[in-house]
Image: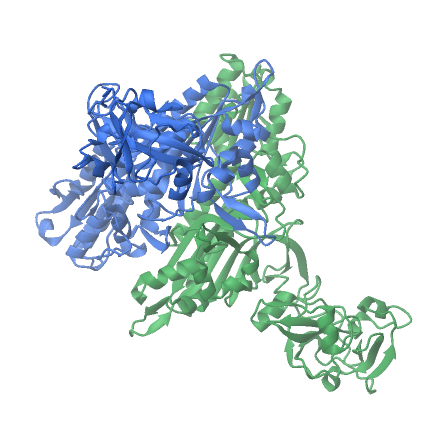
Chain colours: A green, B blue
Amino acid sequence: MRWTQTFIPTLKETPAEAEITSHKLLLRAGLARRLAGGLYTFLPLGLRVLRKIEAIIREEMNRAGALEVAMPCLQPPEIWQKSGRYQDMSEVLYHVYDRAKKEWLLGPTHEENITVLVASEINSYRQLPKNFYQITVKFRDEIRPRFGLMRAREFVMKDAYSFDVDERSAEVSYQKMYDAYVRIFERCGLRTIAVEAHTGAIGGSFSHEFMVPAESGENEIAFCESGKYAANVEKAVSQGPLIPTPTASTGASPEKFPTPGVLTIEALAQPPYNVPAHHQIKTLVYIVESKPVVLLLRGDDQLNEAKLAGALGTVLLRPATPEEIYELLGAHPGSLGAVGVTHVPVYADLALRGAAGMTTGANQDGFHLRHVDIARDIKVTRWLDLRTVKAGELCLATGLPLKISRAIEVGHIFKLGTKYSEKLGAVFLDEQGRPRPAVMGCYGIGVTRTLQAIIEQSNDKDGIIWPMSVAPYTVCITPLDVTPGGRIMSIAEQIYRQLIESGVDAILDDRDERPGVKFKDSELVGFPIRVAVGEKSLANEQVEIKPRAGQLMLVHKTEAVNRVLELIKRAN
Amino acid sequence: MRWTQTFIPTLKETPAEAEITSHKLLLRAGLARRLAGGLYTFLPLGLRVLRKIEAIIREEMNRAGALEVAMPCLQPPEIWQKSGRYQDMSEVLYHVYDRAKKEWLLGPTHEENITVLVASEINSYRQLPKNFYQITVKFRDEIRPRFGLMRAREFVMKDAYSFDVDERSAEVSYQKMYDAYVRIFERCGLRTIAVEAHTGAIGGSFSHEFMVPAESGENEIAFCESGKYAANVEKAVSQGPLIPTPTASTGASPEKFPTPGVLTIEALAQPPYNVPAHHQIKTLVYIVESKPVVLLLRGDDQLNEAKLAGALGTVLLRPATPEEIYELLGAHPGSLGAVGVTHVPVYADLALRGAAGMTTGANQDGFHLRHVDIARDIKVTRWLDLRTVKAGELCLATGLPLKISRAIEVGHIFKLGTKYSEKLGAVFLDEQGRPRPAVMGCYGIGVTRTLQAIIEQSNDKDGIIWPMSVAPYTVCITPLDVTPGGRIMSIAEQIYRQLIESGVDAILDDRDERPGVKFKDSELVGFPIRVAVGEKSLANEQVEIKPRAGQLMLVHKTEAVNRVLELIKRAN
């Protein structure tokens, strides 16, 4: 391709809309343009990268035996009602109305669609296992689309759905996808960490997320430096708080004392009270599927909503309002406690087990209770893991300290079990002729998000540094004088032609621009190898080869093509 | 690919939903499945065909210098309001609402999106011409989705948009696309006729449709057998009616006569009146952009609404209701005429020019007028070409009779002019530094419709006959005994492997099914070449090669691969 024949609108300035590095570079390198909030047009170079990532995904999915299909974007709400997700995912579903005012949905994923298909087409164990995938556009009604392709209204996703005769076979399908994902991200030049994760509204029993560590990430992951344990912080566990919970009872009964104006754990830790946070019980009220529950945590711990949802098996939960709380406990937030509470279920975090000599709210505004022994004074309905792990806590598997890092989720694989197959009738006859629901898994990759995550992970002050496998073009040939028929242009054209003939994705920067502009643009766009042809080096019959992230080399002009081919070979 | 490893749910029976041949075969061959009305899931084989068609389109678009991009499906209504199409195309636009109740549209095409992009990115004649295309899913709120992929709610379309500095350059861009379309359909093995067409709601001055002649088509085309003229019947012209219009005046003035119960041209042509249809003036009333107009045609002619819309430059027109007509002319349909009408514009078809001695309604229920000389008795506001041509009328270009045939529209190219660039600000500075709107063209191919049109054109009683270029697999190897390690399977496996190694898209039917079932399926799916390996022919060391649409050949087993390669080569 010749630069003047394609369309690469690089920008010197960063558009105001861009917040994080990869978003800025996406726009500055002319890969994409914003149409509206969360909606982007892929320009020729951006689309080339997208297609290369898609091709890698397709190869690995096919290699793993998955079968490519393509399902419609528009979906009938009826199947979403059957699966229960019409309600569970209502927040992110776009509603579409046709001329007859009939409602349709724009699918964020396609569990319903594929399960309905399998229900009508597969009826024998002999047709299983099957794994269907598609690489198509998906939609999600984001509260706040942002960070470019990271959180968009519309995005390209690879989604796959496996159907197996039993749990054991489903495990094999899951592992195949896990392995395929590792290969896919590796081949894209992306460093990812596979972490244990919650299943959320998708449902199912078990899942892994593929995470790209990055400051701008919207997730937090905890991981052991041994590599033996990694989990989304929403799911992560540890040996517990570094400071042990006090378990020595004072012997005294709960005693009310005035704490006027004290509404936070921090305030109670200050003089004149001086109650350390880990000597306090934090009391929260949640509404779970429209019923209130009281949650207890150590004062220095944070509630992990995902753990709560996971433990209770529902995503329909929210903090109670101050009004709801007052009606329930007779006090406002800041003075809440569970001593004597029997009319509401009380769920306590495991770190509070055996806690004694604790302080908590008195359910009377402006008062707290001390000398609280949890076993004696609080009727705990269930003990649950509700707290969020902290950096430095010890790994359950290795005893080493956990690290916590922000990360971008690029893939997510789920063991779904029979949730969808039961509800939507994906039942087959087993060897004994008995009807059984297929055991499912589902597997997603955010393809457009992966593209931007690669940029986020691989850049420097000058621009993007594309891995060879997904670069829009592998080599940029930059003649410093484009006079047609001139020596410089002729040599550049020759190198360009020879690279194309060798099957290399090359672009010839045939613009009549200053060398500085051309160099800056090729660095901004991030082509892995640049070959500059100019008067100065040609005086010695040489051209300059500059790997985007490596040292400049001067090579004899007749050696340029071979040297480039070597660099490409070495990278693969 | 092995048959048992993919998913080809062929059907013996035709599903009730399918009406036309290609729709039946689409389902029976296991290429796609219906999710809901006008929504289809592509199964593995159908998707392979789709991808091959897309690849051909992409190659030819790239060869023609067009640049691939990808625009979002969701579009902000604001840009559609600016272009005027929010109203003009309101009937086919899906409206989407997000959680903030903000409206979005699902795009049937992307003129607005690309013009807005060009408006912000291109500002100099030096950046032109440019032609951007995409192959993406589109949406259309069809009154009645039907015929499978032919008229679907959601479909894959290739749309391209060219931007040029002036008309002359725009002509070149248009012609490049015309030529690319001819090559694309040829390479897909599809016989098309390029016809002149109306531009409709897309707008613009000129357009061609690429039509596949087919009984089930929803369009009608008129064409001269010389090949020198072809047009959509909506647009087609001829030398005029075969029976000339009477032009001899009777000399008498218009005379009212009673015609009780006579409400049609046909009735007045019967005894006791005996007025031949071509001696009658047909009077219609239309509401054009909310104002009434009277339309006159020869009694034996049909109004062509597209011509009317084209002549008046609006798509906002409809027949008036009987109530509106009565209020306007004082009579009901069946007794209408234009004699003495001066308070409404009267548009007369050119075939009525000079008509004399005619009969028409008297604008009094149950009465007609005779001895009407149009020039003398009717105040014609404008003379227009309003009639629909008929088979057998003579071609303006050649004088030969026109044929009329039903056809499927698979492509449509438009000269748009500056309609969108003016409204959406796609203005560039010319060589003299003057701002000028870009001259646009737009170019569509219904990709999923093309897939089905190929089936509609190429099939027999046993199933589909795929052209080699787009077949899901080129060769199907059919061992008649699949015992692993047996002689038959070993030879079949060897042929399969050798074909794959030669780069041939081959499928091995490794199902343990009766030969009859396997033969029927391979014919139904329509693989271009079948290689059957069975005991009987192997007795002579031979295998059977059967081109889907050709004669069976027995060849030595070691010659099979070469013979297949020859057949493939010959087809290209």
- Identity of the residue furthest to the right in this view: A272
Tell me which residue sits at (28%, 42%) in the image. B471
Residue A177 appears in the rendering? yes
Q: How far across and how far down the image is residue A326, in percent?
A: 75, 74
- Residue A304 location, quadrant: bottom right
Depth check: A300 or B24 in front? Answer: B24
In the image, taking residue B284 as reference, residue A293 lies left or right, namely right
> Does A436 appear above or below B323?
below
Depth check: A64 or B220 in front? Answer: B220
Depth check: B204 or B329 in front? Answer: B329
Residue A49 appears in the rendering? no
Q: How many marks?
A: 0
Q: How far across and how far down the image is residue B362, in percent?
A: 32, 33
Depth check: A490 or B197 in front? Answer: B197
Tell me which residue sits at (50%, 59%) in the image. A413
In the image, taking residue B223 as reference, residue B77 lies left or right, namely right
Q: How far across and how far down the image is residue B445, in percent?
A: 37, 36
- Residue B218 location, quadrant: top left
Q: How far across and how far down the image is residue B96, in percent?
A: 52, 49
